[in-house]
Image (spheres, rainbow, N blue to C red):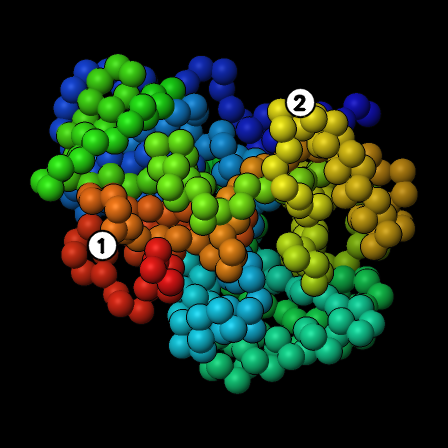
Amino acid sequence: MRTRYGLSPWIHALASPRAAYPRFRGDRAADVVIIGAGITGCAVAYACAKAGLDTLVLEAERVGHGGTGRGAGLLAPDPGPSFRDVVAAHGLRDARRVFEAWRRGAVEGAALLRRLRINCHLTPRDSVIVARGDDVGRLRREFDARSAAGTAGIGLAWQTAKQLSNRTKLDVAGGIRVRDGFTLDPYRACAGLATAAARGGAAVFEQSPVVKVRFTRKHADVVTSRGTIRAGAVVVTTGSATAEFKPLRRHFKRRETYLAMTEPVPAGVRKQLGDPAVVVADLRTPPYRIRWAHGDRLLVSGADQEETTPKVRSAAVVQRTGQLMYQLLMMYPVISGLQPEYGWDASYGEASDGLMYIGAHRNYPHHLFALGGSGSVTGAFVASRILLQALRDSSDKADKVFGWTR
C-alpha cells in the first residue's frame, strides 16, 4: 500500500473541504475573544460560554487543523516531564500541584466529552512507562519519589518484568503503570467542543487571522483583516507564541514530533502484541509512545527534533516515518511486513521545563495565555479551568506554577 505522508489520519477521515464556520467581518464587542481554535481554544470557549460570558473565537485556518488535529490523541494523566525533574525545577509542593492538576484534567476532560456525547472514540487506557537494563534504577527512583509525594502517586503501580511481559509482550526490566489515561480522536474531540461552544452561545470564526491586538487600560481591540472586536479579555491558545507576541517566543523552543499509523493489523498478529488497553512509553526525552488506534491500527510517535524548514520538511517526514516503523519493529518483530498507512508531523513549542504557560503576563494587559505543552490534549482542560477562574477574578494561587513568573 502507498503511505500517505504529511496527512493526519484524524483530519483525513472526517474533515470537510468546506469550512464549518464563517469568516469574521465587521466590528463588534465581546467579553472574551479567544485566538486559536485547537482543542484548548475550543475547551476554553465552551467553559466561557457555559459561564455566561459573551465569547468569540478566531481561528486563522480551520478548527482543529493545527497541532490538535495532528496530535497522537492522548488524554494523558501526566504532564510530560518527570516528577523528579519538576521537583528539581519548582520544588515538591508545586510538583504535586502540576501532577494533581494533570490527573484531574484527564479525568474531567473525559467526563466532559462523555457528557457532551462527542463521538471521538474516547477509550480508557493505562499508561506504562518501561525501562531496560540500567535505566530501570532511574525509573524506580521516579516511582519512589511520586509514591512518597502522596497524591502525585495516585493510580501508580510498579510493574515487574514478568508483569510487563504478560501485558505488553515486551522484554523489559521493569516499569510504572499509571491509571486515569485515555485515547481519543483529537480532531473529533476538538470539532465536538467547538460545536458545543457554539450551541452555548459562542461565536466561532474560521479563516480569520488576527493582524494585531491593541490595548488600553480598559479594553483590548483585536484586529483582523476584515474587522475589529473590542474585548474585555483576550485569551491566546495558539500552541506557541505567534508573531504578534514576539517577545514571548524566547520562552519556547520550536520542535517537531513525528507520528506513524500502520495499516490494520491482522487478527493473528494482534494477539501477539499484548493488551490493547495500554499505552506504552519509554524513557527517552521525549519518549516514543505506542498505542492502538481505531480500526485495529498501531500508532507510534516520537523521534522529535528541532523544527525543520518548509524546504526539507517533506523529506524529514518520510525519513522519520521510517525511523518510527523501525523502532516499532525492534519492539515487536512479529509486525514484520506491516506498512505505515500514514506518516506525518506536528509542530509545537517546548518550554524549558516542559510545562505549559497558563495565565496572565504583565506586559500584555487584558490578555491570558495557554501556550506550550507535552503533546497530549489534557492541557486543554487544565487551561480551561485555570483561565475561567482568572476571568472570574477567582484564581487559585497554587496554579502559579503554570504562570509566566515561575
From where the camera sits, is residue 173 visible?
no
In primary-sequence order, the first of circles 2 and 1 is 2
**Where does residue 267 sit, x and y in percent of width and height?**
81, 45
Viewer-proximal residue, 127 or 304? 304
Left or right: 24 as drawn, with respect to 101: left
| Element assignment for label 2 | helix
- The three-letter code of the residue at mark 2 reads Lys
Residue under pointer 1: 390
- The three-letter code of the residue at mark 1 reads Ala
**Where does residue 315 sit, x and y in percent of width and height?**
74, 27
Residue at 20%, 22% in the rendered image:
228
| Element assignment for label 1 | helix
Viewer-proximal residue, 219 or 116? 219
Residue 311: which disc? 2
Compared with 161, 269 (above or below) is above
Left or right: 39 as drawn, with respect to 324: left
Q: Quadrant of the N terminus?
A: top right
**Where does residue 112 sit, x and y in percent of width and height?**
37, 51
Compared with 367, 69 (above or below) is above
Residue farthest to the bottom?
148
Residue 23: which disc? none
Within 10 angstroms of label 1, few (less than 14), some, or many (20 or more) residues?
some
Residue at 44%, 42% in the rendered image:
249
**Where does residue 377 sit, x and y in percent of width and height?**
48, 48
Within 10 angstroms of label 2, few (less than 14), some, or many (20 or more) residues?
few
